[in-house]
Amino acid sequence: MKRRTTIAAFLAALCMPILAVAAEPPADSIYQLQAQLTDQSGRVSGLDVFRGEPVLISMFYASCPNACPTLIAAMRRLENRLEPAQRDRLRVLMISIDPKHDTPEKLGELAERHHADLQRWRFTRPEAADVRGIAAVLDIQYRELGDGEFNHSSIVTLLDREGRIVATTQQVLRADEEFLGKLRALIGAL
Amino acid sequence: MMNRARWLAAAFGLAAAQLGAAAFADAIANDFRPIPAGRFESVIAPQPGVTAADVRAFDLAITPVTNAQFAAFVRAQPAWRRGRVAPLFADTRYLAHWPDAETPTPAQAQQPVTQVSWFAARAYCAAQGGRLPTWHEWEYAAAADATRRDARADPAWRQRLLDWYAQPADELLPAVGQSPANVYGVRDLHGLVWEWVDDAGSLMVSADNRDQGDDPDLLKFCGSGAVTMEQKDQYAVLMRVAMLSSLKASYTTATLGFRCARDADGESR
């Protein structure tokens, strides 16, 4: 009995520092960035909400007339090219550059309009002060033009389970085969 | 005897002048000046077809942040130490000019800090209860000379700016605050270092807003087209835009520093 306790204590001591290290994302992970997101259901999380799974991440704004629907469609097209079992592992995180207007209600409407699988997709808005930092780690440029319009670069980024950037694509009008290959390889290696 | 006295006086005078410069830099480096609201013609069109930018009243630091100030910040927030900072937030040249991770040389103390990333500059200003200025705020304040809010149409003013850009980058940067104050009481906006702005990631430069790239599959910008550059004769300011827009937020260079701003009510936006 005593020996078992000792072993348990030893194992606990062994595990604790490992767990502590695992809690800190790798130095080159975008999960190093502190940011607060609120999703279409009002749930609050950090940028690392999908940590542990591969993630497609991009930025958009809900009232965008043309290109953003194209961007979302492109991401759906990418995941539709995966086998269902692979698709189940993939998470999709959409982050608004217009938190002032993109309320959870608006994000929810957008999700519905695009028939997004909300088990795996989240449409989120960051705190206003966090938008620039998130855009910077994703290398996305954006500018508010007034009248609720924005310019922003359309970049889809693939993150590994720890939030490290594996691949990016700006090809949104048809599937980027090279990017798709990296996506399949990443999920296949899980 | 006389010579010696004169020499001593000269030596003391010089030392006093140097001390004076350092003390002066110290005294103003933490200070802000109010910049009144206004409308001006920006080189970056705020909207397609609109060239006048509106700037709300804000406070701008008199000088860029010094090495000594930044060292105090790094000591208070070790996550921003050279060697400790995540590579996501700063490249390998970050603060590489300091002899150790927390201390610049005495000669560097009052010089503007350089080799800092956008993330680090932002964190510094946030720690002081401020923020980085936006591009429009910076450009608006930097349009002034000693007597005019907008000196940009003056060929002599333009030439002075271009002369600075034509100078070879100096090994040893001068202390902050040595240049004459502009009409707002702000110094060193030109002639010392380049400066980060909060929206450096917005300075998407395209000569024509119809230019979306050659590849129709590569929809570069989502929204109403790329920003256009106006006033193409403002070379010195456009050089700054070109330089800033070429940098990623983790990049650091030996000639790029920053200063902080605050909203006029004293809160960061």
Image (tube, rainbow, N blue to C red):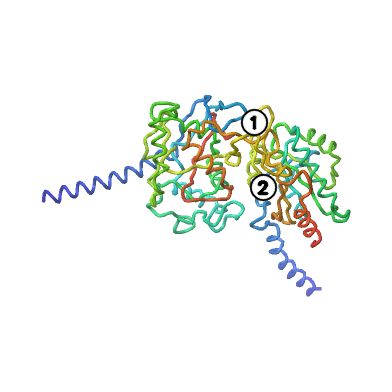
| Label 2 sits on residue | A138
Quarter containing the N terminus of chain A: bottom right
Query: In the rendered view of the protein, which quadrant contains the C terminus of chain A?
Result: bottom right
Task: Tell me the subunit letter for badge 2.
Answer: A
What residue does disc 1 label? A145
Determine which quarter of the picture holds residue A141: top right
Marks counted in the figure total 2
- Disc marking residue B263: none
Q: Check the image and name the residue furthest to the right.
A: A84
The percent coordinates of residue B156 (x first, y second) are 38, 31
Q: In the displayed image of the protein, which residue is found farthest to the bottom?
A: A3
Say left or right for B22 vs A183. left
Give me the residue at 44% from left, 58% from top: B99
- Rendered position, B96 above or below A61: below
Q: Nearer the viewer, residue A112 or B34?
A: A112
Residue A61 falls in image quadrant: top right
* Mark 2 crowdedness (10 Å alpha carbons): few <14, some 14-19, many ≥20: some
* Residue depicted at 63% across the width and 44% down the height: A133
Residue type (three-letter) at the residue carrying disc 1: Leu
Q: Secondary structure at mark 1?
A: strand
The residue at the point 73 percent across, 52 percent down is A158
Q: Image height check: is B224 above or below A19?
A: above
In this picture, residue B50 sits left or right of residue A178: left
Residue type pointed to by label 2 = Leu
Dot 1 crowding, Cα within 10 Å, few <14, some 14–19, many 20+: some
